Image (cartoon, grey):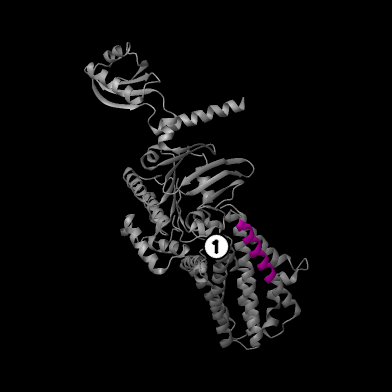
Amino acid sequence: MKNRVGSSGQPSRGEALAPFWAIVQADLGGLFRSRITYGWLLAAVFIQVVRTLGSRSAGTTSSVVPSGLSDFVYIWSLVIIGLAASSVSSEAGELADSIMSKSVTRLDYVLAKFASRIAYTLICFSLVTAVLVGLTLRLEVGDYDALGLTSAVLLIALTLVTLTTLGVGLSIAMPNTVMAIVTLLVLWYAMTILFPVVGLDPLSPGSVLGELPGIVRGAWSWGESETVAGFVAISGVSTALSSAYFHLKDI
Amino acid sequence: MGQRVIEMENLTKIFGEKLIAVNNLNFAVEEGAIFGFLGPNGAGKTTAIRLLLGLIRPTAGEVKVFGEKMTPGSSSLRRRMGYLPTNPRFPPKMTPIKYLDFVGILFRLGREERVKRLSTLIRSVGLLGDSSREIAGFSTGMVTRLGLAAALMNDPELLILDEPTSGLDPNGRMSTLELIAELGKEKTIFVSSHILSDIDRICTDVGVLSEGKGIFSGSIKDMKKRTRSHVVRLELEGDVRKFCEALKPAKWVVGFETRGDYGVDITFASELPMADAVREATDLASRQGLDLISVSSSTSSIEDAFMELLRDEESRGFLRAT
């Protein structure tokens, strides 16, 4: 019997990572070819341009940038929720046939899904935010601190990464895509609106938005560090738990 | 005896503590065999295949492939296997070239090898003209052919085909069977089907599954032999009644029954070999001036053998219940 690859034939590191990169590329390729992405980017850039030009006479960087970033938490989070929470469950039929029956480990697949959806969120966020920040710095009163402005953008990026990991995690745990989307919607808006009411301000995207003008001006407080730690922890736990669950589940 | 490529040992899968899909299955497939995995719809064939690929975990027992235990993490074992699912589903926005290249990367093939294999395979399965069309617009036959190409992308030692002729027109079915027979010359093939004539045509060995349980495993010849009775079936042109009259005094005949206008089933004495019984019957027909249209053992078809096995299993189940 031929024995080209067996327990003794360990693939090189490049070979070992090939399935992971192939899944990431295929997933990102599919996302960036979709009309949803084009529509989202066009609408988001258009709104940022209108906002910046509209506040030209009276706006400041510390008011316009947080206002532009809030779109991601309140409006564009819907797109992220839809795409993240359907990432695994929507391809349940193809999953076994076209991917998992090949030489792919479950960890390859699940980590590739997290990586591609996070990369997609960050690329779209970066493109729209680059327009917002670029126009604001050119047109508005510059009451900002460079490090503060960068921190504010990165804090919202982290918030969206947390939303994406929660979405992919739910998509792994729930076989029904609609159920996963609804659950994430409820969770996200509960975090945004209800968490401050029950004293969980650091984990509330709504509270983070309230702090953004100060952060842009350079006022970083202990509360923001708690938020960073909280969102990193939520993302890590969500990724670890859903990966462990996917490893055990029948597909 | 060849090396065992697949070994299922007391393999059991229960879904949600309710449905016993596979029940204490014990099958072995040797290297170089074309193993037919037979069973009616819902018998548990696809579940057994998913266990074989490590897509689901057994509730009890184990399955070994190439002598190693198959688990969801056994990607190195899957690297030596090709799989064609029933009615396969592939990424609809990809083209065959893109999809086969993707599959090649999943199998960790180098770029040069991928390009070489995918161009050969696309031509072999007749998809060259559609190689840059999106899979979304493909017919069932085209998707199956693409699935077969994907299953062969890594040049596997073991090929697992789940109902490969399902949804194909007669032409497609025939060419798929020919391709499987051709591939069987250099690979071990595990092919599931409920189409008995397909199995009879291409397989060397067979395993029969009924309600999740293995009820037979062996060569096709053994399966037919096991259910052989002492009946020879003739189809004749001429006066069949005259032939039946001539059968009555014959010592080797235990009984007979007419089948329609030109068929007769003759039950012969058990000590008489089948070949002698056929010779006696055809000689008699010839002496009576009848032309022979066909002659067969009434249980020589795999259909009869299969039905007999299922009936046996059903009656055993009934006895166990009483």
Residue lying farthest right?
A199
Considering only vertical position in the picture, is A34 above or below A173?
Answer: below
Q: Residue at label 1? A: A109
Q: Which image quarter is the C terminus of chain B in?
A: top right
- Percent from the top left, x then y, of residue A224? 72, 77
Q: Say which residue appears at 56% left-offset and 56% top-offset.
A: A89
Left-right relation of B45 to B147? right
Residue lying farthest left?
B289
Q: Say which residue appears at 55% left-offset and 64% top-offset.
A: A108
**In this view of the protein, which residue sits in the foreground, A184 or B55?**
B55
**Amino acid on which the number 1 mark rests in the picture:** Tyr
Q: Quadrant of residue A132?
A: bottom right
Q: Indicate yes or no whether the magenta region holds residue A211.
A: no
Q: Say which residue appears at 33% left-offset and 57% top-offset.
A: B127
Q: Say which residue appears at 52% left-offset and 61% top-offset.
A: A104
- Percent from the top left, x then y, of residue A201? 74, 71
Q: Which residues are magenta?
A: A232-247
Considering only vertical position in the picture, is A156 above or below B12?
Answer: below
Q: Quadrant of residue A122?
A: bottom right
Q: Which image quarter is the N terminus of chain B in?
A: top left
